[in-house]
Amino acid sequence: MGESEQRQTAASRLGAPESVGISTLEHGVKPPLSPQGKIYPFKVQMLDETLETVEVPIRAPGKALLDAVCSHLNLVEGDYFGLEFQDHRKIMVWLDLLKPIVKQIRRPKNVVLKFVVKFFPPDHTQLQEELTRYLFALQVKQDLVQGKLTCNESSAALLISHIVQSEIGDFDEAGDQDHLQKNKYMPQQEPLEEKIMELHRNHFGQTPAESDFQLLEIARRLEMYGVRLHPAKDREGTKINLAVANTGILVFQGHTKINAFNWAKVRKLSFKRKRFLIKLRPDANSSYQDTLEFMMASRDFCKSFWKICVEYHAFFRLFEEPKPKPKPVLFSRGSSFRFSGRTQKQVLDYVREGGHKKVQFERKHSKICSIRSQSSHHPEPLLEVPKQPDEIQTLQQVREDKRVIDVPVQHRSPSPKKSPVARRAKEDTDVTADGEDAAKDHAQKSLKNTHQPSTGSLTGSPHLSELSINSQGGMIGLNPSLSPNLSPDGKPSSPLISPLLNEPACIRTDDEEESRKKKCPTDKAYFIAKEVSTTECTYLKDLEVITKWFQNAVGKDDAMPESLRNLIFPNFDPLHKFHTSFLKEIDQRLSFWEGRSNSHMKADNQKIGDVMLKNIQGMKQLTTHLQKHYEALIELEKAIKGSRKLESLCREFEQEKVCYLPLNTFFLQPLHRLMHYKQIMERLCKHYPPNHVDFRDSRAALAEITELVAQLHGTMIKMENFQKLQELRKDLTGMDNLVTPGREFIRLGSLSKLSGKGLQQRMFFLFNDVMIYTSRGLTSSNQFKVHGQLPLFNMTIEESEDEWGVPHCLTLRSQNQAIIVAASARPEMEKWSEDIQMAIDLAEKSSGPVPELLASSPPDGKTPEEGPTDQESEDDLSASRTSLERQSPHRGNTTVHVCWHRNTSVSMIDFSFAVENQFSGNLLRKFKNSNGWQKLWVVFTNFCLFFYKSHQDSHPLASLPLLGYSLTIPSESENIHKDYVFKLHFKSHVYYFRAENEYTFDRWMEVIRSATDSASRSHLLSRKESHMY
């Protein structure tokens, strides 16, 4: 940085103000060329293989040349890119943006600089410009050709199929064969050409911009995406490779990642001669600092790698460009290198706030020109059918109107004593990046903001902190112990049970950032068809839990009998195959309807009844498989009860992220899906006038599905009750034979029981023959301990608020025992009273008293208030459910536990009604005190909202149980000046959700109300005449 300390000029001696240059945030304004030099034409090779000549003064800093290249391309997000060249030592180095070009390139006439991607963000949705994504796609293509982006054959074929779609358009067999013969996208491409063409066939109607988006979506999940290997050796002399990424430093053996050092875990990164040193922060359970040492080929290689590490850290972790250090008066020790340019946060802020004109750019290998717009237009992925379980999946996605900017979540720490924010602020004050032989560490600025640009990893670089660059070498480190928690796509595992309450986990935008509005149809029938697509996408992923994930888990072990395998999987695989084809047909119809392709056929395709009729008739052929699901569920539970090995396998599978609901719930989904089709067709027929062209097919489809539902309704009712009893059995301890023939579940919930110790919270379970009460256990399994049972035969119930002076109080009297219980509110008491009276009536009609359920029943007449009172409060629940960084023990987020913490109850009819109201789609979410809206893929099921970053994700990021929440419309005083917004709030927790249009807003309100409001029993019974009650 000696160049920044300039000599005193004549102007300064005369008192003229000193020029500090142009801020890097003022994009498009060229910096002053100082010192002046002759203009020199530099040769720059672009990502599309063209060679351009760019003229800048030879004594100008490197930034002038990079700015000139970005200006030539009309590139707004140029900060992700850099210029690399081979120096006189034959080492590929990055052009330093601060040093004069003449000091870096000795023989410019013989040097060709390469314009390439330098910083790879974890999520391509952070790239707001179509041109930027196009250049990233070219980089992926280049890495694939050069063998840098290694992956399995299926992934490679999928990547190339999107490249081909971008270059030549829709599938044409002869054109594809000719194009693949002339263009080689990877070494040894020939064996994959048939697979590439097969996959290309699925991309019908996909534009080049959409292909770029799909390509990056697949590439970002690959382990070698954006990785540039630097050869090194460890202390034992083993050959390894080092690389740097947005999350930290990675260690590879060959092309296999063996370790990772997250930025948050590194105190200092430095180099000394050929030694590259990583000083980690002390572990929470030890008092020493661990320093890792790697040996590189030479000092120059070592310094080159250290510099790119410094730049990666600064770009992804800092708020703003680090300030230069004061120059020593006499002696200078170590490197003066520092990062120069905008950080990722500044880039995101600039693009968000800037108004950019639409600019055309040319795709060298494509016939179609693309227009870059001001809005953050991200194309939508189309259908991909992965062929192997370990392949990257991109399920059929509903076309999205908007995309937004990524934001991180907090760092996950093993220490429970400090909050992640406080701990992170403390840690980053210690981190320094020093050059060789440095003697001093500079203090850091305190953490100022908790909403920083994301690195896309939940443990990666959540909250940005400023890092001063000293002279001894840089920062970095992910604790190796965290590495096993990373998923195959490089992302750390996320708990399923915590709602996104405090922290944004994926994409974020400010209010003023509105994506372009699609010119999509406004007919209600179109939105109904859209609902079929979005919910079918979710249903298909639910089927995959059985057909793919569970089948793979079972296949690795011999715990499941062969007869049971033959009963389960052959009856689910045909459903998955059928509905995969059904989803493709629905989305193709939507494509025609929206006019994305074959617009001349649009008028003939503005209907959905014919597609529904054809496929519902096809579903009738699957009735035999559907009827087998009840038998499969019963046999699975029997096998689990008889085999500890199978029980352990299923329990471990339920803890997998993909199994976001209890395993046996997925056996019910096919029958529940038939109910959804029936509701959808009812709405469609109600919307159409009798003379509509689609009315006849829609009525016929409704008749067909109604017949199918009636045929399987009895099976569904029995399965629902059996599944619920099995789930309750897992939640309870201290009782035998809960699941017996003829027993039906009615209601569960939290009531306060009056005893000598006063009112104590207890969990009550009401069946058609008995009522049991429990307390929450303090074991690691979070089960409820049974304290007593009340046979319903000859039981009486009466209100006793006046007698005991306890609000909302009921007295339950059985033959030998009486207990007093109190509900949290009057409506809750009325629901319990009505259900208990109904259960008593059912018991009176039965053959007599119920046999003992308890493994060891307490003596009659005694109330066992024996265990210690559970001290967990609602605040504890809030704490456990408001952080993505905490994961409760197994069975800690079932409906039973939610009712316990929310002090509410739920009935079997509520379960059945909620099942009919499953829904999924895109929503924008906003916190109470935040400004930005965050786009998420949301699935509603089982009284819960599950949040995904996109519909393609195989597992949710988090969830929000809705029992106890209130659903309202924001008031004027809340300043939510947006359409289609609804509000969910429970105590101090407030969330706003925004739908895309009036239809989806009404549907979200309807389905969420089924979980937040207890529906009228008479209304429900009128809809379920054949219910078990």
Image (spheres, rainbow, N blue to C red):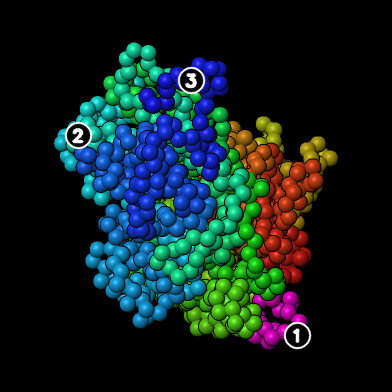
Dot 3: few (<14), some (14–19), or many (≥20) neighbours within 10 Å? few
User: Can I make out residue 956 in this image?
Assistant: no
**Residue wearing tag 3:** 10
The magenta-colored residue range is 680-703
- Residue 368 position in % (x across, y down): 48, 69
Cα distance in 3D space between marks 3 and 1:
89 Å
Question: Image quadrant of residue 242?
Answer: top left
Ranked by sequence position, the earlier of labels 3 and 1 is: 3
Please, what secondary structure does the residue beneath circle 1 have? loop
Foreground disc of the pair 3, 1 = 3
What type is the residue that disc 3 sits on?
A: Ala
Q: Is residue 309 above or below residue 831?
A: above
- The residue located at (76%, 43%) in the rendering is 974
Residue 909 painted magenta: no
- The residue located at (59%, 39%) in the rendering is 502
Tell me: 873 left or right of 247: right
Disc assigned to residue 298: 2
Quick check: marks 3 and 2 in contact, CB under 8 Å? no
- Residue 557 position in % (x across, y down): 30, 59
**Residue wearing tag 1:** 690
What is the quadrant of the C terminus in the image? bottom right
Cα distance in 3D space between marks 3 and 2:
44 Å
Main SS class of the magenta portion in the image: helix
Tell me: 349 left or right of 692: left
What type is the residue that disc 1 sits on?
A: Pro
Dot 2: few (<14), some (14–19), or many (≥20) neighbours within 10 Å? few
Question: Image quadrant of residue 831?
Answer: bottom right
Q: Please, which residue is most extreme toward the top here?
A: 330
Q: Nearer the viewer, residue 364 or 218?
A: 364
Q: Nearer the viewer, residue 922 or 682?
A: 922
- Residue 624 position in % (x across, y down): 48, 80
Residue 692 painted magenta: yes
